[in-house]
Amino acid sequence: MARSSIRIASGQGFWGDWLSAPLLQVSRGPIDYLVMDYLAEVTMSILQKQKQRDPRLGYARDLVTVFAEILPYLHERNIRLITNGGGVNPTAAAERLVEVARAQGVRGLRIGVVLGDDLMPRIDELLAAGYEMRHLETGQPLREIRSQLLSANAYFGAFPIVEALQQGAQVVITGRTTDTGLTLAPMIYEFGWSEHEYDRLAAGVVAGHILECGAQASGGNFLGNWKALDLVEPGFPIVEAYPDGSFIVTKHPGTGGAVTRETVSEQLLYEIADPREYITPECIADFTSIQLEDLGDDRVRVFGITGRPPTPYYKVSASYAAGYSAVGTLVYSAPEALERARRADEILRKRLERLGLRFEEIRTEFVGYNACHGPLARPIEPNEVMLRVAVRAPDYETVDRFTRELAPLILTGPPGVTGFSGGRPKPSEVVAYFPTLIPKHEVPHSVELIET
């Protein structure tokens, strides 16, 4: 029998988010599900490199720390946890959580692991089958960067998670799952929605979009009356969902921040291209159909959402090695700090040219003047300026030679260097993003259960 409502709480908005949030969510009031989103596009390539160095890694390691703190509440209050913190190695992540559970004496906990999104082992097979997997913006075929490929993951949606829940999983760990799918899955599972109920699926997608960035929907990073908000202990958002697809966004009483029509609206606009076509694996949601009603007391009702059938493709987030880069800084103080920094940049560029160094890009920013606004920055006379120069080149040696040219400016350039932070910069690998598509029928998924 379908439940009359469920409460789904956001616990993390990215890998590196506020570590106290998950414990606050499970301990400060009633919830049925905790969802934790760890993955950004570049995160997958970072995790893939970690796994290459150590096959036991490749997941968001903060997940283990958080899980140890919240497990007593999950167990005692029958709260289910859903997270994509498994990264490129969800099985290893699940095994670590099993160790945590057994160490705390928790037995019989079922952990569902969603597999199949990692396409790296199948890339050559897919290319040989005729799938060009062209870059969504440039049209470049993936085969042209095959030798540099670091990661390739299909964005699964909610239905693989639903399978894990149907199999009795109290904890579900996935790899590259859409941010919205983490929230949509329990709504499908609890309310019995079919894959063809596009309006309801779209409503779940919108709910997931509101929760995916954590406190950004409940007062964090808010452009409105932010001065009035207490964000020492912000309440992360909670969705109180109903079978008809409507839901209320709220937070635990007594926590900081705010849930208002304005905070929810700002999050709805986050990372939106065509608002009529928010494409997910389950449906296409029409964000122009969303209606909001501020109920007061940190409660905003969301309703009226419509959706359409999905596309036949999964989006694939791929990354590849694209050379090396380095960033160096010098700080100049008043008087004439900006003029000194500009002269230093001119000297540096001429020296690099005389050395015969060729870069794909050299970028200079004057932090304190134009680093954020570039050519739109208004003329000012700052008290101090950080000269920040970044270079990018295909080979390590060229970038490394650049790193040896900053420090000499302290004694062979304009006067007034008061900071050389971090010492000589080190070249680092550049990871480029490659978005593409693959037909869904070519990417089967599977669910494995591990029991403590």
Image (cartoon, grey):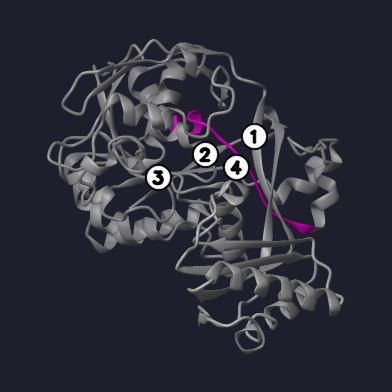
Alpha carbon separation for disc pair 3 and 1 = 21 Å
For the residue labelled by badge 2, is the local secondary structure a helix, a strand or a loop? loop
For the residue labelled by badge 4, is the local secondary structure a helix, a strand or a loop? loop
For the residue labelled by badge 1, is the local secondary structure a helix, a strand or a loop? strand
Please check the rendered image and state whether residue 390 is part of the magenta-colored stretch, yes or no: no
Location of residue 435 by image quarter: top right
Query: In the rendering, which numbered label is found on residue 315?
Result: 1
Q: Do the residues labelled 3 and 1 touch (CB within 8 Å)?
A: no
Q: Earlier in the sequence, mark 1 or mark 2?
A: 2
Query: In the rendering, which numbered label is found on residue 13?
Result: 3
Q: Earlier in the sequence, mark 4 or mark 3?
A: 3
x and y percentages locating residue 393 in the rendered image: 77, 66
Image height of 295 relative to 234, above or below? above
Q: In which quarter of the image is the N terminus?
A: top left
Q: Which residue lies furthest to the left in this view?
A: 254
x and y percentages locating residue 396 in the rendered image: 76, 74
Image height of 403 relative to 92, above or below? below
Question: Dot 4 corresponds to which residue?
Answer: 116
Q: Which of marks 3 and 1 is nearer the N terminus?
A: 3
Q: What stretch is highlighted in magenta?
A: 148-163
Closer to the observer: label 4 or label 3? Answer: 3
Alpha carbon separation for disc pair 4 and 2 = 11 Å
**Would you say 133 lies left or right of 218 here?**
right
Alpha carbon separation for disc pair 3 and 2 = 14 Å
Question: Dot 2 corresponds to which residue?
Answer: 177
Q: Earlier in the sequence, mark 4 or mark 1?
A: 4
Residue at the location (81% across, 57% down)?
Answer: 147
Residue at the location (62% across, 80% down)?
Answer: 414
Location of residue 163 by image quarter: top left
